[in-house]
Image (cartoon, rainbow, N blue to C red):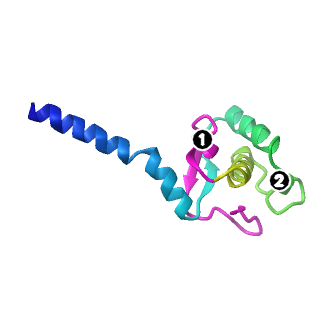
């Protein structure tokens, strides 16, 4: 009986410390959404198309500061973050079919500034 109680207590602890609290932490600190490095090319392209159909992704255009480097993971990260910032910074707006990653370190580089609102 003691083992069962310990297992139940542990499961309750995991539930309480899971995504619900993570979402709460996101609301209290600066966060950005980027593409997971393990994401495949097709997923990254889908993420760009989805995000840019909902937000203005002109910063990814040729000649703009965030165009370079012109690779899918970079462009997907910027597009995903634009969507994440515009639609409320929470876990669900950075999930992108489990290919998004919420970070607390500003991913901006050079003259390319990742939006934070």
Q: Which residue is mark 2?
A: 60
Indicate the quadrant where residue 2 lies. Answer: top left
Residue 68 numbered tag? none
Q: Nearer the viewer, mark 2 or mark 1?
A: 1
Q: Is residue 94 left or right of residue 10?
A: right
Q: Nearer the viewer, residue 74 or 24?
A: 24
Residue 111, how many percent across, how many down? Answer: 77, 69
The single residue placed furthest to the bottom in the displayed view is 111
Q: Which residue is mark 1?
A: 95
Residue displayed at 46% across by 46% down: 20
Residue displayed at 51% across by 51% down: 23
* Residue 93 against residue 7 in the figure, above or below: below
Q: Nearer the viewer, residue 57 or 67?
A: 57
Q: Nearer the viewer, residue 37 or 91?
A: 91
Q: Mark 2 or 1 closer to N-term? A: 2
Residue 94 falls within the magenta-colored stretch: yes
Residue displayed at 79% across by 51% down: 70
The single residue placed furthest to the left in the displayed view is 1
């Amino acid at each position: 009986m003691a083992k069962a109680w310990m297992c139940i207590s542990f499961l309750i602890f995991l539930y309480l410390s899971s995504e619900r609290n993570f979402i709460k932490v996101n609301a209290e600190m600066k966060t950005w959404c980027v593409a997971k490095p393990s994401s495949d090319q097709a997923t990254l392209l889908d993420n760009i198309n989805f995000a840019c159909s909902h937000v203005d992704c002109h910063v990814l255009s040729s000649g703009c500061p965030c165009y370079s480097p012109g690779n899918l993971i970079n462009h997907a990260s910027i597009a995903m973050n634009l969507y994440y910032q515009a639609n409320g910074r929470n876990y669900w707006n950075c999930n992108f079919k489990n290919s998004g990653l919420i970070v607390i370190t500003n991913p901006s580089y050079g003259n390319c500034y990742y939006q934070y609102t």
